[in-house]
């Protein structure tokens, strides 16, 4: 089987000077695609000697463990013993051996955490994962948050502050960095940590770690708010169009991005005859009904949108 890609080492043919070099994996040869001369032979195939026909087979036959992850205090490099009562072949472990296996698991968990710093990191990353699951954020965001927390530990920014507040601040910063921001209210509800403490911890991290995150815009919240309200793509497009006009006319200047996004969604839902009440929009956006009402009146007046009937 020929690989038509150019040779990664940038080799050229000694005869014709062509750089169109291909690899024949069946014969183990390096061939010039222009003149046909064999440049090398008997090179080693670095791929696996087995074949797989689906992702499950590929995962079972692989001889390597899970990739390195920042979500584990040892970065996932240590051996893990499963808590299921089954052996490698999927057979159930006999009852007479379960007590012994339980002791092995227990001591294995203990020796993985060797000092206070690792214990702190282990607890913090477990909390971070729990908060991430409740918020429904992707793994890459949790990885970014874990990396931010590790940097905070290295710079000794945890001293004098609770682990929970720093973890929540790291999650908030990671969401903004990936441009999928979550409100402080959402993170506060998912972690049971006071919103003011999270905000204070975030400002501390942003300053000391020089995160330099750009301010969030109403665009960042429109899609997620619409999804929570079960509004379709048409509502998202119209809401974003209202947000764009609000920014161009300067209405949103000095206003909270969540309030502008919520008001734009409220207007769009009524225009499309799929009305959502201000109470429903306020619940998913984390802003008050008064804020939505004020932003709604400002936007409809400046943009010349006909005043809509107030929703209950």
Image (cartoon, rainbow, N blue to C red):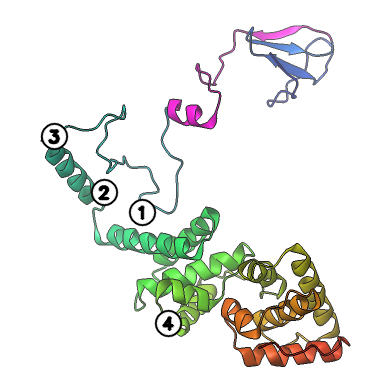
Does the magenta run of residues contain 107? no
Question: Alpha-carbon distance for marks 4 and 2?
Answer: 32 Å
x 39%, y 45%: residue: 76
Closer to us: 275 or 103: 275
| Residue that mark 3 sits on | 97
Number of other residues with Cα within 10 Å of mark 3, as a class: few under 14, some 14 to 19, many 20 or more: few
Span colored in magenta: 35-62
Could you tell me if the residues under marks 3 and 4 are in contact, i.e. CB atoms within 8 Å? no
The quadrant in which the N terminus is found is: top right
Q: Mark 3 or mark 1, which has the lower sequence index?
A: 1
Pinpoint residue 181: horizontal percent, then vertical percent: 60, 69
Number of the front mark, 4 or 2: 4
Number of the front mark, 3 or 2: 3
Secondary structure under tag 3 reads: helix
Number of other residues with Cα within 10 Å of mark 1, as a class: few under 14, some 14 to 19, many 20 or more: many
| Residue that mark 2 sits on | 112
Number of the front mark, 3 or 4: 3
Question: Is 73 rendered above or below residue 11?
Answer: below
């Amino acid at each position: 089987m020929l690989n038509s890609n150019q040779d990664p080492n940038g080799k050229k043919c000694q005869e014709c000077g062509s750089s169109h070099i291909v690899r024949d994996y069946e014969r183990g040869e390096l061939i010039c695609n222009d003149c046909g001369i064999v440049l090398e032979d008997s090179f080693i195939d670095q791929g696996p000697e087995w074949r797989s026909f689906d992702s499950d087979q590929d995962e079972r036959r692989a001889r390597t463990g899970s990739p390195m992850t920042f979500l584990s205090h040892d970065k996932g490099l240590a051996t893990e013993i499963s808590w299921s009562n089954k052996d490698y072949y999927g057979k159930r472990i006999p009852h007479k051996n379960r007590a012994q296996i339980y002791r092995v698991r227990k001591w294995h968990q203990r020796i993985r955490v060797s000092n206070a710093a690792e214990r702190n990191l282990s607890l913090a990353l477990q909390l971070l994962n729990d908060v991430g699951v409740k918020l429904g954020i992707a793994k890459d965001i949790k990885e970014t948050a874990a990396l931010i927390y590790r940097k905070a530990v290295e710079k000794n920014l945890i001293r004098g502050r609770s682990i929970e507040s720093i973890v929540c601040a790291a999650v908030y910063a990671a969401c903004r960095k990936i441009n999928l921001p979550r409100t402080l209210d959402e993170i506060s509800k998912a972690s049971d940590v006071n919103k003011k403490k999270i905000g204070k911890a975030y400002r501390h991290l942003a300053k000391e770690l020089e995160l330099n995150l750009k301010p969030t815009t109403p665009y960042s919240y429109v899609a997620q708010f619409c999804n929570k309200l079960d509004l379709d793509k048409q509502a998202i497009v119209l809401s974003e169009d209202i947000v764009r006009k609000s920014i161009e006319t300067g209405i949103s200047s000095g206003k909270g991005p969540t309030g502008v996004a919520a008001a734009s969604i409220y207007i769009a839902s009524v225009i499309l005859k799929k009305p959502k009440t201000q109470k429903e929009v306020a619940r998913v956006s984390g802003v008050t009904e008064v804020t939505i009402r004020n932003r709604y009146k400002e936007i409809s007046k400046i943009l010349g949108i006909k005043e809509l009937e107030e929703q209950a």
